[in-house]
Amino acid sequence: MPGVAPWWKSPFRCTCTEFGHCLVFLLTQINKWQDSAIRTVQDRTRELPSFLGEIIHRIPLAAPPTALLLRFSHRQGGFMLLADKVVVVTGGGRGIGAALADQAAAAGARAVVVADIDLAVARATAQRVGLRGTAVEAVRADVGSPADLDELARRTREMFGFVDVFFSNAGIAAGAGIDATARQWARAWSINVMSHVNAARIVLPSMLERDSGAFVITASAAGLLNIPGDAPYAVTKGAAVALAEWLALTHGGRGVQISVLCPLGVRTDMLVDALNAGHETARAVVASGPVLEADEVARCAIEGVAEGRFLILPQAQTATAYAEKAADPEGWLARHRRATAVPAS
Ligand SMILES: NC(=O)c1ccc[n+]([C@@H]2O[C@H](COP(=O)([O-])OP(=O)(O)OC[C@H]3O[C@@H](n4cnc5c(N)ncnc54)[C@H](O)[C@@H]3O)[C@@H](O)[C@H]2O)c1
């Protein structure tokens, strides 16, 4: 092509797309190898005491060539390690959110902001997380209020400079079927969907500007597989998964990691209270797979983000059922109906 020097004559000003493709291919292959090597190390260290596991996790990433590749893989939407990051968790006062805050600190976060509608529980969690030596702050924020979310981001930036990782985790159950009141439906949309939309509007632009960050939505396996009983919950969790997909399609691969966490049952107040009240949804959740501890789910989420995963499924059953649903929707519905049918109490 006239006027364009071939890459071998102009090594510092490459204009040859083939060379660019070649380099991208090569780095992608190395990155894949590096990814699987790190995953193997992580798998082998999972059984070790957590402090040993953490040290070993960091060794391969500390090597200079890997650090260079890490920059590349990060641009591909690859790794988002929590070490030295500023992490915000909504609904961080209890349950999965509190475990995410704690595990983020255990993974070496520079600062953790625990946001909750209930300031007292946010403070209690922050105090516990602070024992790990991480800078922590408790903030009262109702995720249903865009003004509260704005203020949460503003305060985080003021205190710590950036928001690197945002766990948009707070969510609520309605405890009613299709006949839930208009108020219950509106509240479910506000907390389980619009809170993520508003948080993304607020924190994503600066992540995209810096080419770095992670935005993680806690949806639910109910968002992929539905659940009998609580219609507002099942429907809005489906929308939360769709939102995460939209964000990943639109912004993924630009240095910002988008993930969606979809657990089945987790032993938190949300599930235990609903079980104690005899809610059909809670009984169906327990019937469909193992109930995990919040810490297990949080560890899985943090590993998933570090590995650059979009869909994070703490229970293996969810992946199997999701594949079955895609392959045979009618058969899956019939089986799912039977599997989640709960005897009348
Ligand atoms: N527990 C489960 O079995 C399960 C399963 C799948 C998904 N989830 C999802 O995980 C997330 C966390 O659930 P959990 O089980 O830890 O619940 P939880 O009820 O134990 O804790 C939720 C926390 O969120 C806070 N919160 C509630 N409304 C809020 C609001 N408007 N603004 C800010 N904070 C608010 C609460 O004060 C509480 O501290 C939710 O999105 C939930 O739907 C839970």
Image (cartoon, rainbow, N blue to C red):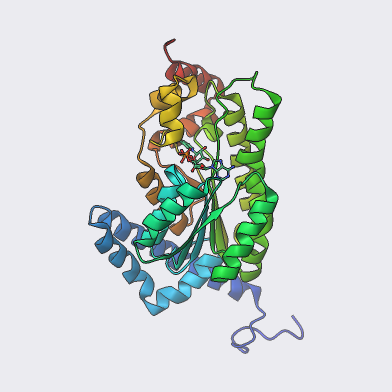
Count of picture labels: 0
Quarter of the rendering containing residue 60: bottom left
Residue positioned 52% across, 70% down in the render: 72
Depth order, front residue of 286/112: 112
Quarter of the rendering containing residue 104: bottom left
Q: Is residue 61 left or right of residue 327?
A: left
Depth order, front residue of 30/173: 173
Residue 179 in the image: above or below residue 225: above
Is residue 194 visible from the viewing direction of this image? yes
Quarter of the picture containing the C terminus is top left
Quarter of the rendering containing residue 179: top right
Residue 282 in the image: above or below residue 86: above
Depth order, front residue of 97/193: 97
Q: Position of residue 91 (x, y in %)?
A: 52, 46
Q: Is residue 74 left or right of residue 182?
A: left
Q: Position of residue 277 (x, y in %)?
A: 45, 21
Residue 93 in the image: above or below residue 79: above
Q: Position of residue 234 (x, y in %)?
A: 57, 29
Residue positioned 60% across, 64% down in the render: 155
Is residue 302 visible from the viewing direction of this image? no
Q: Is residue 46 left or right of residue 335?
A: left
Residue positioned 39% across, 61% down in the render: 130
Quarter of the picture containing the N terminus is bottom right
Residue positioned 27% across, 62% down in the render: 51
